[in-house]
Amino acid sequence: MGFDDDWAGMRSGATEQAPVGMRLNQLDGGGGGGGTSGGPPSLATAPAKKKAAANTIENELEPDTAKAAKVADAATTAAVGGFEGWATAAGLKTVETTWDSQVKNLLARLASEKTALRSTALTFGQQELDTRARIAGVGPTSRIEQY
């Protein structure tokens, strides 16, 4: 049996498979959008949840991360002193420097996320006001200006 015979067998077997559950050879019937269950599209934000998440970052994650970093620094500094003159002390010092850098990056990331969470509600609110103002300016008596 050669390649051509194998290929022909595979092709004929492919057409005899079970029916496909989804076909992409037709339009979806229109409507579009991101609505659920065929309903109208919607953009839902949860300002209260964003505020709660930002507060959790500010009141729990940032302080706890800073405290954990100080505890680890104190333990590492004590270990470096205990291994004074050994290569282990130099290695621990390198670990401490890397740890401090990672903690600094984590705290910066947490602060960035907190700011983003808090500014999202403001951004959506501004967009809402802008959209309302533009819609209010469009009416039967409004005129279109050429630029």
Image: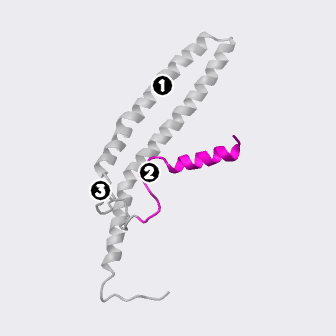
Instruction: Give the residue displayed 60% in from the left and 27% down from the top.
Output: 97
Q: CA distance from mark 2 to mark 1?
A: 59 Å
Q: Earlier in the sequence, mark 2 or mark 1?
A: 2
Along the viewing direction, whichever of 25 and 140 lies nearer the viewer: 25
Residue depicted at x 50% and y 22% = 72
- Mark 3 burial class by Cα count in 10 Å: few <14, some 14-19, many 20+: few
Q: Residues within 10 Å of mark 1 (few under 14, many from 20)?
A: few
Residue nearest the observer in this picture, 34 or 89: 34
Q: Nearer the viewer, residue 63 or 137?
A: 137
Numbered disc in front, either 2 or 3: 2
Query: Which secondary structure lies at badge 1?
Result: helix
Q: Which residue type carries mark 1?
A: Lys
Element type at marker 3? loop
Locate residue 115 relative to residue 45 in the image: left or right. right
Q: Residue 65: where, in percent of width, then height?
A: 44, 30
In the rendered structure, does residue 26 fall within the stretch colored magenta? yes
Front of the two marks 3 and 1: 3
Return the mark for residue 70: 1
Quarter of the image where one finds residue 88:
top right
Q: Which residue is mark 2?
A: 20
